[in-house]
Amino acid sequence: MSMFKRDRLLRYSPLLAVVATALLLLAGVTGAWLAERDYREQKIEQANAHARVLAASVSAALAFQDPTEARRAVDALNVNPEVVAVGIYSEDGTLFAGDTSDNRALPQTFSEVARAPYSDGYARARVDVTESQSRLGTVYVELSTDAGAARWMRYIGIFLLLIMASLMIALVAAAQRALGAANLELERRADALAESNTQLTLEVAERRKAQTALAQAQKMEAIGQLTGGVAHDFNNLLMVISSGLRLLESRDDPQKRANIVASMRQAVDRGAGLTKQLLAFSRRQKLSPEVVVVQQRIENLRTLLERSLREDIALKLDFDSNDSAVKLDPSQFDLAILNLAVNARDAMPGGGLVSIRVRNQRNAEGDFAVVSVSDNGVGMPADVAARAFDPFFTTKEVGKGTGLGLSQVYGFVLQSGGRCEIESTEGAGTTITLILPLTDEPAPERIVSAEPKAVETGVGAILVVEDDDSVASLVCEMIGDLGYSATRVPNAHEALSRIERGLPVDAVFSDIIMPGGLNGIELATELRKRRPDLPILLTTGYSGHGVAEVQDFPVLRKPYDREELGAALAQLRPH
């Protein structure tokens, strides 16, 4: 049913109730009138029946003018209590015999007898007395009926039921109208609520779009700041290398050339460290985990940490008596501790204390080594501390570093299966805690000292697959210095073609990321199918998808030096 039809039905429900009530009352009155009519007709018929019986029984008395016999017939009829008057009139209309039960006087002549068959609460009948088709006289019978009030009492129950039904109809109509009005109001409110919900959904969607746009803008701004810092640091490194190369061309003094080379090597090391920071920041640095004892590792860093801090900053190491053996990348752990120490140093421009504390801790999640690096410097506001590990957030100015220190720490700890916590109060210092899972694997024996490894050389033909001309030139030079012969091709397709044409090759050294639709991993896989015995060494400075999962081939990470390249090539030779 449509809402319009329902509204009309609810609007006219009281009128419908009144009509229904009137119809019920009319039906009740009509029923009472019909019952009364039937009652009167029944009484008149009874009176006629008595009169016919009386007429038949007094015909002889009228014929022989015997009042006594007529009287007996009257008395016999008066036995019926409903009979209140009986009169027998002769042919000339005079009263021959009769009697009444209510002490009323009978009419003396037939012409005075009431003619209405029913009036004043009496039913009357007149019947002629005949004998052989001769009229001898007339009899008159009058029956009493119930009083009007008594008769109408029979219908009071019906009327009461009708009135109660009418009231029920009225109440139901009123309730239905009220319920309908309430339903309509609920529907109106539901429609309004649905409209409000739709509007709210649209507003939420618009707000999300605005928040997404704002977050993207903030992200791009942070990336811009980050890129500026990285570009600044790399420009400094490139300037050192570029200037060093020019100075090498104009310097003959071996000592000066050695100093220049040392500066260039230091710049290269700094660039490699910055690259590791960027990879850790992006959570894509491939780690080389091994079991280390945290206390021993930090103790070995003491000298480097003290040199990284200023003279007005003291270093305090506080270790648990129980060793904390964890499985992680040792070099990345060293870098993380060094980053935290440098951040602590920058937070204490007026000097202070850097405290490194190591404790073992057990909770419901397992056993952990808890490494805390604390300072009593300027601290951080709550909003800064909340975003301290955010990779798109830095408080460092352009030219003051990349600001990747805490991001590197966070990424490394997360990759190692641990978590980082920070607690800082503005003006009261900062504590950064590294929570690392302990391991049951045995720790290696502590190495007191080790002799520098000698450069490993060898012989054989190496096929170098490298698309960058400058890198390829330097790699071939290093391979030559190591005693090998080197042949360079710019891509994987050329490498397959040269090998297919019979180029003598003892090993393949290929970059992973290359143009041409075939990368180093795919090249190695294809060569493994064609020449399963051919040694293959891969190299890359990238740790993206598909690279970190290389397991079937050894990978040499960029940047590398001659010693590392020699050791990697030596590993390819059968032992």
Image (cartoon, helix red, strand yellow):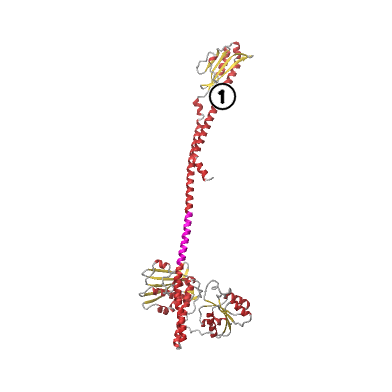
Q: Amino acid at mark 1?
A: Glu
Q: Position of residue 428 (x, y in %)?
A: 36, 70
Whether 376 is drawn above or below 38: the answer is below
Whether 215 is drawn above or below 337: the answer is above
Q: Position of residue 319 (x, y in %)?
A: 42, 75
The residue positioned 48% from the left and 69% from the top of the image is: 366
Q: Nearer the viewer, residue 438 or 129?
A: 129
- Which stretch is magenta? 197-218
- Looking at the figure, which quarter contains the C terminus? bottom right
Instruction: Determine if residue 72 is in view.
Output: yes
**Magenta stretch: residue 201 in it?**
yes
Quick one: which residue is furthest to the bottom in this view?
Answer: 253
Q: Position of residue 201 (x, y in %)?
A: 48, 56
Instruction: Determine if residue 437 is in view.
Output: no
Q: Going by the image, does 380 lie left or right of 443?
A: left
Q: Quadrant of residue 374?
A: bottom left
Residue designated by label 1: 41
Q: Secondary structure at mark 1?
A: helix
The residue positioned 37% from the left and 78% from the top of the image is: 311
The residue positioned 47% from the left and 86% from the top of the image is: 249
**Magenta stretch: residue 126 in it?**
no
Q: Nearer the viewer, residue 449 or 227?
A: 227
Q: Please name the predominant secondary structure of the magenta segment in the image.
A: helix
- Looking at the figure, which quarter contains the N terminus? top right
